[in-house]
Image (cartoon, rainbow, N blue to C red):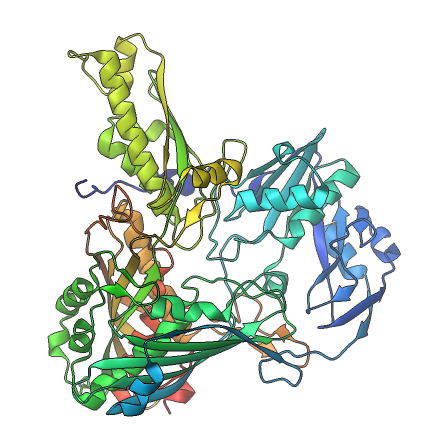
Amino acid sequence: MPSFSEIARFDGRNKVLGKTQYGADFHLPGMLHAMLVPATIAKGKLIALDISPALQVQGVVRVLTGKEAPSLKPDIAYLGQTVALVVAETLEAAIEGAEALRPEFEKTPFAPLMTSPGAQREAADGLDVGNAEDALASAAIVIEGRFETPAQHHNPIELLGTVAAWSGETLTIYEGCQNSERVKAALAEALQMAPNLIVIKSESVGGGFGQKSPPKPQTILVVLAAKLTGRPVKLVTPRGQAFHISPHRPRSIHNLRLAADTNGRMTAIFHDVEHENVIGGMFRASGYHEDLARLYSIENFKATAREVYIDRNLTRQTRGTHPFPACFALESAIDELAYLTGKDPVQLRLEHEATRDIIEGKPLAPHQLNECLREGARRFEWNRRRPDPGSMRLDDGTLVGLGVACGIFGASGAAAETTLRVRADGSSKVMGSGHEMGQGISSAIANTLAQTLDINLDRLEIVLGDTSAGPQAATVGEGGTSRIVPVMAKAAQAMRERFAELAGPNPPGGNLHQQLARLKRPYLEVTVSQLAPGQDQSALDEFRKAGGGQARGFPDFSSFSYIAQFVEIHIEPRTGRIRMPRAVSIADIGRVVSPRTAKSQMYGGVVWGFSTALREESEVDPRFAGYLNDDLADYVMAVNADIGSVDVGFVDVPDPMINSVGVKGMGELVMVGTAPAIGNAIYHATGKRIRKLPIRIEDLL
């Protein structure tokens, strides 16, 4: 398939006109408003809750406690855990009612931090390939370092919003989520309902980044409130509460040893990691090595890992997930090795191109990481770099540093099915499977259809995130585009072939809509399905049942997306103030399906990478196990003034093994490698190796 042309954002016009509706935008007749009541202790038990003060507030209709909602447990596991829900005629009354309640608690000791007494440690799965211990013992050079990444919170613009409405025995939920099928399944189990009586509508999501992947604890509460009151109910969780009840990136500590010979040939890695978790948490420490071990050709790799159980809210996948912190450690160590051996940091990486998956013992699908490095170095003008730390300055004394680092993220495939209908009246409709979070999945669908079919894109309806229209796959782990685009391409080709059968050797003129009208055919419809390599009918059955069938590993090969990040850092020598006037980011994501939205994601990755490297940290108050900076004023993030010129690009080469279009994923990848590139640039500017994030001014003074 040839390269895809660029089209405008499919969802752009409605967003600019204010027509896009997110979960909390739905206002239903007779709707009530709700507000959560949080626990004010970190650990213990709820022993008393007098709801009468809330019921005395004018407009309050009902207060839900553990009596009505079994999910409201008396055992408190973290600060902010919901203990009640106040439902009122207005939002103001709901807030006043919630603030009027004074729950009584019995406190027990808690462990707020990894370093706290009582923080329990448990070994997690590791990895041992080759003989890393012998290679490290006999190595001419061993780079050792302890690297830290902080707890950080997702902060999508759309808050956690839920609207629930009952119509007889049928339940409809409007909310922004990344996995509407899982929300549906969780509600069906909790309510003991038939799944076909539950509809989740998540047509547009105002950012997710992993926060909106698991079912929200608030959803079942809103549903029960709507059931008990007989009216629709809306809840929008304030950001300060969301910090304490929604999942976040855990703090992690990486102890890394990197072995090499005197020429800089890397021979072994030992990677030991521990991170924050809660008992029962699904984000596991064993994941940090899985992509890292495949990034370069290094045959000996040993990894050990530990969970450190603390008493705070749930940890979860955050954009970049495991590879982001892990690559900060490895790419910083590789940069240190380059200086020690006198090797150019780009050339050192070029010499370690991986062709084999050392974990699975399978070949890697053809990839373009080295081309990303070469193209990035060319655009960045890497050859102007002077190798010695502190050797580059501006006329006013500003220190200049250039840094490079790479990133990796696993590519995946999955079973999928779609129905496409093209009408003679000029409209079309396609049933998609996934969620539009602003990342551009709808644009990718539209552009895929447009490559094969001459249809009116301005009258194309793409159904996403709506469980009433068909199974909805989770949009996580950069698997959305790679799952949906191949089946869309197959549907477009099937539609073209169906029309050719209908029209015969002499088709009428015009686009497909006009041709159907001239043939007196009101519409044509096709339904097609697709399997990923190595899958069988059972995967398609799983998809049809609940949007499942995801596959990351393939039986005969492994596939990954790659990125090379280049940054220029300026440091004011008296204050240590850091600026990033320039960045170049080049990615290998296979075939680029939607160039415009792909570039947008790349820009976002650089911005978030800068933000995580130099700004973001969730500050924990150990006295209460709560977050001190739980709003957008105090949770410091990058702003426009922080970001200089950003040049992004792609090595637009399809992966011939992963699917018919050759498309891999990119959503998670785009920020991986930015933090070590920035750290490496800071070392080049100052000669100081900073091994923790975020890097602050005080680290440079």
Front residue of 268 and 638: 268
Residue 249 visible in the picture: yes
Instruction: Name which quarter of the figure residue 351 lies in.
Output: bottom left
Is 179 or 80 nearer to us in this picture? 179
Residue drawn 74% across and 44% down?
224
Image x and y of residue 381, in percent: 13, 71
Percent coordinates x, y for residue 357 in the rendering: 29, 64
Image mark count:
0
- Of 438 and 641, nearer the camera is 438
Q: Is residue 250 left or right of residue 610?
A: right
Is 599 situated above or below 300? Answer: above
Q: Would residue 458 appear left or right of 52 to someone viewing this image?
A: left
Q: Measuring from the top left, give residue 557's x and y in whole percent.
A: 29, 55
The quadrant of the image that shows the C terminus is bottom left
The residue shown at (81%, 61%) is 101
Quarter of the figure with the N terminus: top left
Residue at 64% across, 32% down: 197
Note whether 393 is above or below 542 in the view shown: below
Q: Is residue 327 above or below residue 417?
A: below
Q: Quadrant of residue 577?
A: bottom left
In the image, residue 311 sits, relative to residue 447, either above or below, namely below
Residue 608: quarter of image: bottom left
Instruction: Provide residue 673's location: percent of width, then percent of height.
Output: 32, 70
427 or 67: nearer the viewer: 67
- Residue 12 visible to an observer of this rendering: no
Q: Residue at x 20, y 41 (%)?
A: 5
